[in-house]
Image: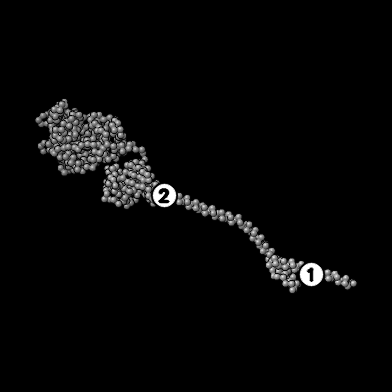
Amino acid sequence: GKNNNKQQPANCATKQQESMSKTLHRSLEAKLAALDGPEWDSSDDEENVQVISQEVGKKGKKAKKAKGDAGKSNADGHQQQPKAKAAAKAAKEAKKAAQRAERERREKEKTERLAGVGAINFGDAEMVRSGPVTDKVWTEISNLKPALAGKEVLVRGHLQTARLVGKGAFVLVRSSLYCVQGVCFESKDGTISPAMVKYIAGLPAESVVDMVGTVSVPNQPIESATQKMVELQITSFHCVNKALGKMPFQMEDACRPDCEKETDVGAYTGEEKPSADGLVRVGQEVRLDNRWVDLRTPANQSIFRIESMIGALFRECLMKKGFVEIHTPKLIGGASEGGSEVFTLDYFGEPACLAMSPQLHKQMSAACSGFERVFETGPVFRAENSNTRRHLCEFTGFDLEMCIKEHYDEVLDVFSDLFIHIFDGINERCKNELERVREQHPFEDLKYLRPTLKLTYAEGCKLLREAGVDQDDYEDLSTENEKKLGKIVKEKYGTDFFMMDKYPLAVRPFYTMPDPENPKLSNSYDFFIRGQEILSGAQRIHEPELIIERAKAWDIELHDIEAYVNSFRNGALPHGGGGIGLERVVMLFLDLPNIRKTAWFPRDPKRISP
């Protein structure tokens, strides 16, 4: 009983062990299954337990390690997620910024292209300071003709007008007498930008510009230009000198044709009357105050080119006739021809004056110095307080003096040939200029005869009396009577140009030779154009004693002309000559009403500038 009792605890223990073992097996088997381990082999519990324990240990470690790694990975993921989002956002913003910068770049490029930034085909040119010389070749506007169609040319001139029309600009560029139209429109390739068109249209009138363009032939003549059958397709336009000051008047107003003819007689006050047609015209005084601008008009350009041609023709004719050009002093002691109408001055403590004419010195040169035939062109000064339309205090004198064999008619023949040569030359060589003057100042062509009509002073006075004009044979002609005589002669003889001789001695200078048959008359003469005097001359006295006699009759101080008188004491040739007023010749040839229109920078009793 004791043994059984002693064995019972042992059996119970064994059962308990088996129960625990089974429980452990099931637990390990469940763990193995959960760990995806080997299947349970119940053949060897002990070995199974050992293997399973090892597998469970390994799998547990792996599972723990995997769980640890997973936890670590999850932790790292949670830490890296904000960084990834920030990086993605930054990349997105960078992409947007790049796209925005590209758009801005394109917009800026477009804006700059439209604004002409960097363009070299327009703008203000560098100041001309005689720097490096380029290979540029300028074409004269006067030479632009249809034959040049398709050729690119460069011209320079004043910008007369500039108009903006839509997306294009029209300009008129003028050089001297000639002008040409230029046009340019915006191009798709940006060569002609809106900025270029705007620049051209915005330049001040009368600025000096260089224009490059291709010559083309328009469908219709360009009426506003002298070069009517061509225009320039502008490719380049630069301002050489910008007109900065306000224009004193509009060129369009300054070029407007005369509404009515201004009177050419009577006092000149400078006052202007409103135009009958209501259009704006520029008055004479305003023109003279701004002469540098006024001289740009086609009419004025033509007037002074004609005047220049007269000088050339004067020299040309006389040179062919054996004359020598001289240059005499304009500063002299005393008065050159007597009288008080001289500009006096102090000459280093000695009284002196400006020469009224080269008269005394040209006589010395021709008759006393052996040159025999001389001429001179130069300034003449008259201190006459004459505010008329035909008098100036300073004008250009064309003088000649020549020796004669028997009669002063020899001189008159030279003058006749000279003026016919001048008139023919102007008509032949200045056709374009004459028409440009006529456009603004209409006039009839001058009529003249070959040879020149010659009347005596007495015959002229008789014609006036026959026309009901009171005129004595020994009285000087008034300006009004000269005009009337000119009309009478034109009607009777068909000429605007004639000469008269045998003037009363009392109205001629002291050195004039008296008439051998009538002591009240003289061997003197005047030439007229359209009824106004343009030349005065005479045979001169070449005997010194007769010179002294005539000087005393004029109350001239002999010491003032001592050198002049003495020049005739050593043998002097008989001679004669005359003096021509250049400005008056031009004025009357063109039938202009005011001598100020033919003087570059007139000097009258009220004007000494500019």
Is residue 356 shown above or below 199?
Answer: above
Locate residue 538 relative to residue 137 in the image: left or right.
left
The answer to whether the residue labelled 2 contacts the one labelled 1, judged by CB atoms less than 8 Å apart, is: no
x, y percentage for residue 291?
A: 30, 37
183 or 481: nearer the viewer: 183
518 or 191: nearer the viewer: 191
Locate residue 464 relative to residue 79 in the image: left or right.
left
Q: Amino acid at mark 2?
A: Arg
x, y percentage for residue 256?
A: 28, 37
Q: Please name the residue that numbered disc 1 is placed on.
A: 18
x, y percentage for residue 135?
A: 32, 52
Q: Please name the residue that numbered disc 2 is placed on.
A: 113
User: Which corner quadrant holds the C terminus?
Assistant: top left
Count of marks placed on residues = 2
Image disc number at residue 82:
none
Q: Which numbered disc, 2 or 1, marks the residue closer to the eye?
A: 1
| Res 594 quadrant in image | top left
